[in-house]
Amino acid sequence: MRRAQPSDLSPNASSKHDGLGSILTLDARTLVLARWALLAAVGIGALVHVAYYFPRVVDDLFISLRYAENLASGHGAVFNVGEAVEGYSSPLWMLLQAVGLALGIEGVLFTKLLGLASLTLLFVGLYRLGRDVMGLGAWTAILPLGCLAANSYVVSWALLGLETPLHLALLVWTAVTLRSFDIPPSEGGSSRRRATITATVSMIALGLSRPESPVLLAVLAAESVLVASPALWKSRLAARAPALGATALVLLAALGIRVWYYHDVFANTYYVKGEGARFALSKLAPLYAEGVGRWERLVLGVGTVLLGIFGFARSRLGPFAISAAVILFTCNVEVDWMPSLRHLLPVTILAPLGIALAVEASLRSMPKDARAPYAAGILMGLFALTASSAEVARLDHRVSVLEVDKNRFRKPKSAEKWNDTLLAFRRVEPPHVAQMSNYDMGQITQAWGVLEASASPISSSWFVGRDIGAVGYYTGVRIYDTAGLITRDVSHAEPWRHGRNVTDEMAREMMAKRPVAGEVYDGWDVALGRSRSLLTGYRIRFGDQARPHGFVAVDRPRPPKREVALRYEQLAAKFPRAFHLHTLYGESVGAAVEKRLRVVRVEFGE
């Protein structure tokens, strides 16, 4: 394989390698202004897209946030104080959240600011990946950024509260920093010392960002050394050795801390979402079926293939290696129930890079006397990117096969959702909350039983069920998680590990906590239905005797009216003050809490 030439890789590449810019009959100053105008348009589009999703969250945000809150408060990195179970998916993200809480910044708002900072890093890193690694011109390197600004999947995940945007940013930056060793300072590259520092920081952060990150890091590190002539392997490895060695030591130390603190080699998420999964290509259906648009399918498929072809030709296989590794990872874990292609997001941001490379190659190869075929190919590439971006931008989100009936995967943006967002920024109660009853208000209703059922301190009371992030973070109740994420008694139970079966004994162990309330599914409701005596002293809120889904205690002293009102005041005080909080599906949780608080002040206030 030939080595990519410095002019292909340098951020200061000459104008003759500037692709589109080199064929425009404009002076240099006008070209620069036009390019900045295009970048500004991409930025404005991204900001509008960010505004649409800004108030939204996903429940798992609050799992990580509660770990961070306990850590910042001196109780350790635990969900339930005294129970060392690693139920979060990103040590780095949780630590960053803890820093914000320690500084006194409201948790949800700080998490969203982290997401916005990560999205900004992703934009800059993707541009650098195109320019410095893949040799795109200054104009064509903007094309993937336009696709990213329109990517509803990525932009929504940047605001939902998990580590996803930081993980994506660190993936592209690690690919960039590892390749910085190959660009001499005379060609615009970094000094060896600076390259070592930036690569080390990027690799360590990537390794701590997601459960699959160490594997992706190993793939990128190996690619940066081995995708070259064998004669260069030794020198390349020597150049990267200090960064690789420091990264390995830190990650091994992090593993040692996990084993010492949590008494396990793996995070508990492995036993919940990875253990026992089988390889299946059908898990890639979101790339070619399950609501994917026609042009989107073309860009994802053809773009990934082109990324591999150009990467092989230029000895720059890092982006393709990321996509391939992510695809293999997705095939080997359980189907992700979370929306908008979370596992496959790296593929969605890198595939447009392959189309941009084809456009760039056509621009550079276009002969003056036979432009028509090349121009047709260029226009087709640009149209594919534009049409695909439009398809994705119109989506509110796409849901998992585990969540909906067949052929109902696409949820489009709508004027109603835009209005909900605007109302959230204005802290105005939206129509769907006004229509709610005074007690049943969607997912946050889990909290009502916790606050009202018992006079016992909430910090020593228990709630049992799944989707426990918000109820745990906002009330402070102890949680027995029937999905096993933060409850080792479930995740390590043999019947549950081998078939997700719930036995009568498991149901008895759960109810031995004497929870103040619960909301159970996935076999736990059936097990309770078989052992109805376990629900003595409880009122079934929804479901029936055979399958009691929701229940609340009625056999213990109730808190005084003033105490109930105070508990609701404390709950509302933890919500963001700047905007109403939404769930992914448009339920304005913040507005619901404020509505319930108004009712409580009348019913329970003194």
Image (cartoon, helix red, strand yellow):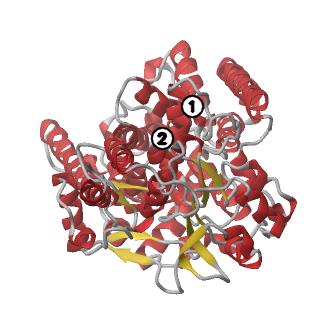
Q: Quadrant of the N terminus?
A: top right
The residue furthest bottom is 406
**Residue 168 location in percent, x, y?**
50, 45
**Residue 521 location in percent, x, y?**
63, 71
Closer to the camera, 133 or 580?
580
Closer to the camera, 44 or 342?
342
> Residue visible at 57% across and 27% down?
182
Instruction: Specify which label sits upstream in the sequence, 2 or 1.
Output: 2
Mark 1 = which residue? 205
Q: Quadrant of residue 152?
A: bottom left
**Residue 587 location in percent, x, y?**
34, 66
> Residue visible at 69% across and 53% down?
513
> Quick check: 156 above or below 213?
below
* Left/right of residue 309 with respect to residue 152 in the rendered view: right
The residue furthest top is 193
> Residue visible at 76% across and 74% down?
531
Q: Secondary structure at mark 1?
A: helix
Callout 1 crowding tier (Cα within 10 Å): few <14, some 14–19, many ≥20 = many
The residue furthest right is 494
**Residue 271 location in percent, x, y?**
76, 53
Mark 2 = which residue? 166
> Residue visible at 46% across and 34% down?
97
Q: Secondary structure at mark 2?
A: helix
* Left/right of residue 311 with respect to residue 22 in the rendered view: right
Q: Amino acid at mark 1?
A: Ala
> Quick check: 205 above or below 311?
above
| Distance from Cα at disc 2 to Cα at disc 1 | 9 Å
Callout 2 crowding tier (Cα within 10 Å): few <14, some 14–19, many ≥20 = many
Q: Amino acid at mark 2?
A: Leu
